[in-house]
Image (cartoon, rainbow, N blue to C red):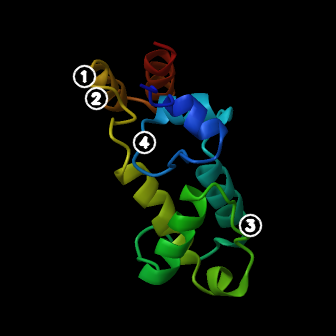
């Protein structure tokens, strides 16, 4: 009787693709070899270049554009965000960033350090707040 191939072998053969949205951040970074997820790198670069729009993260983008972008990143493609529909609807790129963070299975601020983050944010001065947040992040 043959054994089933491992997940790693299926990924190497291109049969099993690594999802971007909804997967554990640490695992995704380990598998991709990036320090920052490609979706966030692409979106932030695009927003920094074209994002001089009021309420970029407050207003939602066009749902079909958001889903198209999500599918491209999940299919291991890096879409060209400078294409006409995305430049005209920059809110879709901002919405995609929010969607990425919302679908992370584990919070960025870990449960173990939540109380320390909360204390750091409530520091009296900006300088003290920055130092405390930095210290918590280093943990």
The image position of residue 49, as x and y in percent, is: 74, 66
Q: CA distance from mark 3 to mark 2?
A: 32 Å
Cα distance, mark 1 to mark 4?
A: 25 Å
Whole-number angstrom distance, CA of label 1 to CA of label 3: 36 Å
Q: Earlier in the sequence, mark 2 or mark 4?
A: 4
Residue behind mark 3: 49
Residue occupying the far top of the picture: 139
Are there few (<14), some (14-19), or many (20+) residues within 10 Å of tag 4?
A: some
Mark 1, residue position: 115
Q: CA distance from mark 2 to mark 1?
A: 5 Å
Q: Residue at x 33, y 40 (%)?
A: 105
Numbered circle sitting on residue 118: 2
- Residue 126: x and y in percent read 47, 33
Per the image, the residue denoted by label 4 is 23
Image position of 136 (left or right of 38): left
Q: Quadrant of residue 104?
A: top left
Contact between labelled residues 1 and 2, with CB atoms less than 8 Å apart? yes
């Amino acid at each position: 009787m043959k054994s089933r191939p491992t997940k790693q072998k299926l990924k190497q053969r291109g049969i099993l693709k690594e999802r971007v949205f909804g997967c554990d951040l640490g695992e995704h970074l380990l598998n991709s070899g990036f320090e920052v997820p490609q979706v966030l790198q692409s979106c932030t670069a695009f927003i920094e270049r074209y994002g001089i729009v009021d309420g970029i993260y407050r207003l939602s983008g066009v749902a079909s554009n958001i889903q198209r972008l999500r599918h491209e990143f999940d299919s291991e493609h890096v879409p060209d965000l400078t294409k006409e529909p995305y430049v005209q609807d920059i809110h879709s790129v901002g919405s995609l960033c929010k969607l990425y963070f919302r679908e992370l299975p584990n919070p960025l601020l870990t449960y173990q350090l939540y109380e320390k983050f909360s204390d750091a944010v409530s520091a009296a001065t900006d300088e003290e707040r920055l130092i405390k947040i930095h210290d918590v992040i280093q943990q």
